[in-house]
Image: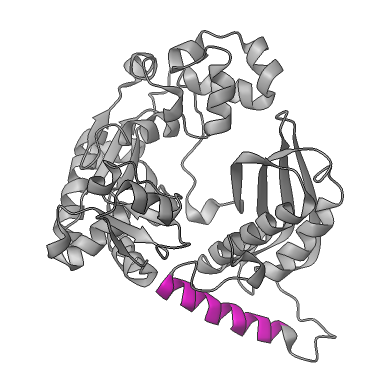
């Protein structure tokens, strides 16, 4: 890193309990009540919960039945993705006012690099305050911000004083800020990793920072080295605008290892659907499909294939991933993480050749089917339509 270059000015912005907050916005009678957004009470999953519900231990990705046991008076509402996207669009229209360097992470959070904007709009802190004010004025909702010299520290900071928080971490106080924090605050360290670190008596960022790199690499491989750098606050990643995205993917770390091929294929089908939907939403398609597998001993492997034609169709992606799966030890070795990513991207249609032998119009039929499925997901959430084999997920 250039020691003469001033530190970056990164802002991480995260809407506060976004889905429930939109529900309260549209129905003020819900204010102050435990609102839980997600699937059905019997077999659904929590998408998001209001802070009133979180006080009972309710959190996202939790089975709805568990949430209702913890919070019997919780008000369960179905997801309304079209409405959430509408409000999200209003929020995201604000960010480019201050910088073109905006990296969306999801429907309700983003990174902004305002290093080059401070002469025009004031300090990064002032910019964050202005954005927070505009979000309230435009949507009636609050957003929390973290301001720091790196993406990692900014993201950790934004979660410190929710809701409506603003946490600032100057470059010369990064270590002071991180050291006392529990490992669960580390972005990318799931429950399995937290337990593995605890067995080494590593409970805080300071513990991790003071642990030898050799031990961490021995126990966790490259991920150990990565976590060690983050514990020091070292993160050189740039804010990547949507225009500069090189790949689109999704991965999941599982609390229980996957032991057999059948559940692995089910997980990959779910991942393929999520990745394909994201690509279509961004108007992108790609040629290179990559499967990522991390075994229980933290060994990470990837397998890739490059297609003749671009795609953003989940069936295409899933078919290719299943073939890649045959080149792994999944089903023979316990698996703790699976991921799918698509690279070699282009705008929809721009990189596609017409298939000479596709006389039955199957490609167009799939395109229309995907368009219909996407509209259903936008209206009813991702549980509104899904492959039959995922109905029990």
Q: What is the magenta range? A: 363-380
Q: What residue appears at the point 32 percent right and 16 percent down from the top-left corner?
A: 173
Residue 373: % across, % down: 54, 77
Q: What residue appears at the point 34 percent right and 60 percent down from the top-left corner?
A: 37
Quadrant of res 150: top left
Q: What residue appears at the point 33 percent right and 41 percent down from the top-left corner?
A: 57
For residue 371: magenta? yes
Q: Is residue 313 visible?
A: no
Magenta stretch: dominant secondary structure: helix
In the rendered view, tell whether residue 337 sits above or below residue 178: below
Judge by depth and name the residue closer to the eye, 208 or 122.
208
In the rendered view, tell whether residue 137 sits above or below residue 143: below
In the rendered view, tell whether residue 127 sits above or below residue 206: below
Q: Is residue 66 visible?
A: yes
Judge by depth and name the residue closer to the eye, 153 or 37.
37
Judge by depth and name the residue closer to the eye, 388 or 6.
388
Quadrant of res 263: bottom right
């Amino acid at each position: 890193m250039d020691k003469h270059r001033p530190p970056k000015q990164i802002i991480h912005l995260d809407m506060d309990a976004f889905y429930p907050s939109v529900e309260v916005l549209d129905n003020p009678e819900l204010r102050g009540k435990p609102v839980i957004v997600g699937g059905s009470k019997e077999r659904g999953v929590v998408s998001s919960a209001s802070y009133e519900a979180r006080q009972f231990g309710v959190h996202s990705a939790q089975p709805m039945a568990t949430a209702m046991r913890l919070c019997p008076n919780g008000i369960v509402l179905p997801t309304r993705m079209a409405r959430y996207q509408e409000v999200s669009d209003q929020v995201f229209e604000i960010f480019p006012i201050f910088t073109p360097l905006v990296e969306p992470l999801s429907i309700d959070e983003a990174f902004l690099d305002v290093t080059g904007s401070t002469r025009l709009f004031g300090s990064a802190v002032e910019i964050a305050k202005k954005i927070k004010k505009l979000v309230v004025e435009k949507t009636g909702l609050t957003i929390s911000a973290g301001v720091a010299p790196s993406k990692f520290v900014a993201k950790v900071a934004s979660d410190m004083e929710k809701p409506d928080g603003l946490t600032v971490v100057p470059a010369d106080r990064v270590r002071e800020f991180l050291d006392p924090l529990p490992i669960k605050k580390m972005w990318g360290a799931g429950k399995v990793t937290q337990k593995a670190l605890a067995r080494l008596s590593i409970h805080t960022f300071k513990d991790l920072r003071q642990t030898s790199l050799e031990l961490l690499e021995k126990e966790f491989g490259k991920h150990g080295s990565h976590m060690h750098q983050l514990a020091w606050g070292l993160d050189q990643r740039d804010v990547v605008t949507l225009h500069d995205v090189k790949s689109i993917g999704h991965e999941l770390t599982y609390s229980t290892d996957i032991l057999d091929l059948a559940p692995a294929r089910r997980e990959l089908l779910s991942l393929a659907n999520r990745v394909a939907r994201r690509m279509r939403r961004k108007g992108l398609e790609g040629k290179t499909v990559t499967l990522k597998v991390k075994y229980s001993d933290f060994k990470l492997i990837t397998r890739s294939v490059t297609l003749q034609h671009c795609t953003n169709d989940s069936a295409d992606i899933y078919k290719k991933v299943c073939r890649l799966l045959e080149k792994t030890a999944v089903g023979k070795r316990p698996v703790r993480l699976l991921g799918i990513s698509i690279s070699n991207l282009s705008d929809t249609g721009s990189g596609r050749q017409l298939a000479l032998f596709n006389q039955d119009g199957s490609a167009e039929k799939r395109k229309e089917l995907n368009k219909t499925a996407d509209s259903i997901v936008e209206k009813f959430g991702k549980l509104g339509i899904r492959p039959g084999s995922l109905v029990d997920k």
